[in-house]
Structure formats: structure tokens, C-alpha cells
Image: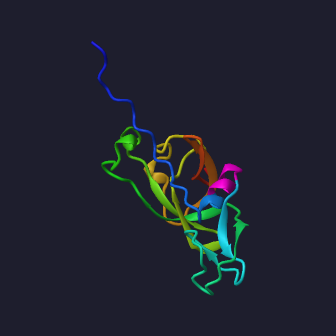
Amino acid sequence: MADATPPPEPLLRPTVDEDGAPFWDYAARGELRVQACAACAALRWPPRPCCPHCRSFDTEWRRMSGRGRIWSYVFPHPPLLPAYAAQAPYNAVVVELAEAPRVRLAGNLVAAPDAPLDSVAPERLRIGVKVQVVFADVDGMAVPRWMLERP
């Protein structure tokens, strides 16, 4: 009798829209960039066509250092998506960028770029801990993840 176990669900890939496409293009090169207004220089996240400060449609993408600090985190119990059940408990973090405190990116804290989402012990996470961006391949797409600045 053949095994009736369904194949594992793929991990979620980000949806790329027109405004955010440059972010993913830079991520594929290992660069963390944030959209900025070319008129007033305000950084903005998430990417969008118009500056909320001066209403300009002129944009540029500024390279960030990739350094930040954990602004918030959670350990989903139970995992909300079946594809992530094997890695539970895993973390989901919100990182405030060092040079852009109003820009906060969501992701996961990992021990190495391609490490599983449960690779960092829960007791290692703290609000304010310094982190550095790394990029992991998720189904052929470079996805930002975070590592402790001082492991």
C-alpha cells in the first residue's frame, strides 16, 4: 500500500508587487534597501507610490547597513500554518533599523542564513537585542532574516 501522506506544504514566499519589486531585486543581490522620497528624503516602509509627507511620486532606494534591534517578537503556539508546524516553536521578530528607527521589518531570528526558523533558543530573544540582516533562499527568492550581532 502506498504512503498516503501528502507532500509538505512549501514555506510562504513573499508577494511581489510593483512598488516593492526593487526591494526584492536588491535582496537578491544581498542588499537591504529601503524606499526613500527623492524630493524630501523621507524613508518609508512599506513601499508605496507616493510620499506620505510631501506627496511626491519620485522615489529612490537607499542602502541600509542591515543593522537593527529587535523591536518586538512572538512565538506562535500552535503554528498557524501547517507548513511551519515542524519548526515550532519558531520566532517572528520585528526589527527596527539602526539608521531608520521609523522603519520596522518583520522576519525571523536564525542562527545562520539558511538555518531553520527554530534555530535560536527562545530565551535568546529580548527587546532591544542588536541584530544583523542575512538573506536566505526560500524557493528561489532571497528573503531577509536576522542573526544576533553577537552570537
- Left of 113 or right of it: where is 61? right
Q: How many marks?
A: 0
Q: Return the x and y of residue 44 as percentages of the image width and height.
A: 60, 74
For this rendering, which residue is in front, 34 or 123? 34
- Left of 74 or right of it: where is 119? right
The image quadrant where one finds the N terminus is top left
Residue at the farthest left position: 1
Q: Is residue 29 magenta?
A: yes
Q: Return the x and y of residue 128 as percentages of the image width and height.
A: 54, 66
The answer to whether any part of residue 86 appears in the image is yes
The answer to whether any part of residue 149 appears in the image is no
For this rendering, which residue is in front, 45 or 15? 15
Q: Residue 10, located in which quarter of the rendered image?
A: top left
- Left of 125 or right of it: where is 22? right
Residue at the farthest top position: 1
Residue depicted at x 35% and y 47% = 81
Residue depicted at x 31% and y 19% = 3
Q: Return the x and y of residue 36 as percentages of the image width and height.
A: 67, 74
Where 34 falls versus 2 (above or below)?
below
Q: Residue 75, located in which quarter of the rendered image?
A: bottom left
Figure colour scheme: rainbow
Residue span colored magenta: 24-30
Residue depicted at x 63% and y 51% = 134
Q: Residue 5, located in which quarter of the rendered image?
A: top left
Q: Majority secondary structure of the magenta segment?
A: helix
Q: Return the x and y of residue 26 as percentages of the image width and height.
A: 69, 56
- Left of 99 or right of it: where is 102? left
